[in-house]
Amino acid sequence: MNALKKTIYTLDDGTKTPNRSEYMRQEFMKGRTRKEIAVELNIKPGIVAVATANMDNGKLKKRSRVFLKLSDGTTVLRADYIRQEVIGKQRQVKDVAKELGIEYVTAYAAVRGMKGIPKGTHGGKVYLKLSDGSTIGRVEYIKQEFAKGKTRRAIAEEIDCDYQIVYATTYKKKEKA
């Protein structure tokens, strides 16, 4: 019979315990990072994060505010600039993100849940502008091009979107017999 071997952890006070979380909390409070602890124990950092939730060892990185210097010389919070451009000027989040050289999700986080976000910016229907100036829904375009025989990868590269979006749009579930 194969019996699982339990790992025993030795705490600083000499106590031996099978409680891995207790060991992780001790090491975290000694100033070690969650990643260091995870590497030592050969586990994912998320497991250490759960064990040390709501704990601060003084070494955690604090989120800092990011400021932008505008062309007129003024300085503004990046999140405020994004809100002004997306909600005030009705620009697309992806365009503002590209302008600032940041990830889409970073820009979207600044406006998530706010009213007045232009259509196609989030959770709504995404439109593509064709070379003739007309627009078409991204899903319709993907289906149309896939039906013509284009590969999923070629479509994703052409419209500059994730392969998973094209795959999810063109995947047909097998019907039950």
Image (cartoon, rainbow, N blue to C red):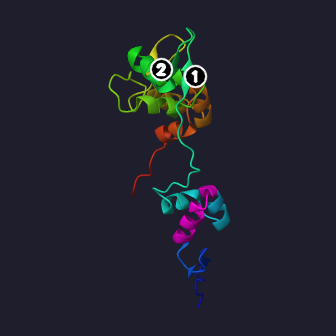
Magenta span includes 22: yes
Count neighbours of disc 2 (C-alpha within 10 A) and say few if under 14, some if 14 to 19, many if 20 or more.
some
- Quadrant of image for the C terminus: bottom left
Residue 78 x %, y %: 51, 24
Residue drawn at point x = 44 percent, y = 30 percent: 110
Q: What is the number of the mark on residue 81?
A: 2
Magenta span includes 29: yes
In this rendering, the count of numbered labels is 2
Q: Are marks 2 and 1 in contact (CB under 8 Å)?
A: yes
Magenta-highlighted stretch: main secondary structure? helix
| Front position in the image: 145 or 155 | 155
Q: Does any portion of residue 139 appear in the rendered image?
A: no
Per the model, the C-alpha gap separating discs 2 and 1 is 10 Å
Point out the stretch of residues depicted in magenta.
Answer: 21-35
Residue to which mark 1 is pinned = 100
Count neighbours of disc 1 (C-alpha within 10 A) and say few if under 14, some if 14 to 19, many if 20 or more.
few
For the residue labelled by badge 1, is the local secondary structure a helix, a strand or a loop?
helix
- Quadrant of image for the N terminus: bottom right
Dividing the picture into quarters, in which one does residue 57 lie? bottom right
Q: What is the number of the mark on residue 10?
A: none
Residue drawn at point x = 50 percent, y = 34 percent: 105
For the residue labelled by badge 2, is the local secondary structure a helix, a strand or a loop?
helix
Residue drawn at point x = 63 percent, y = 58 percent: 32
Residue drawn at point x = 49 percent, y = 57 percent: 55
From the viewer's perspective, tell me whether residue 173 is left or right of residue 27.
Answer: left
Dividing the picture into quarters, in which one does residue 46 lie? bottom right
From the viewer's perspective, tell me whether residue 78 is left or right of residue 118.
Answer: right
Q: Residue furthest front?
A: 13
Amino acid at pointer 1 = Leu
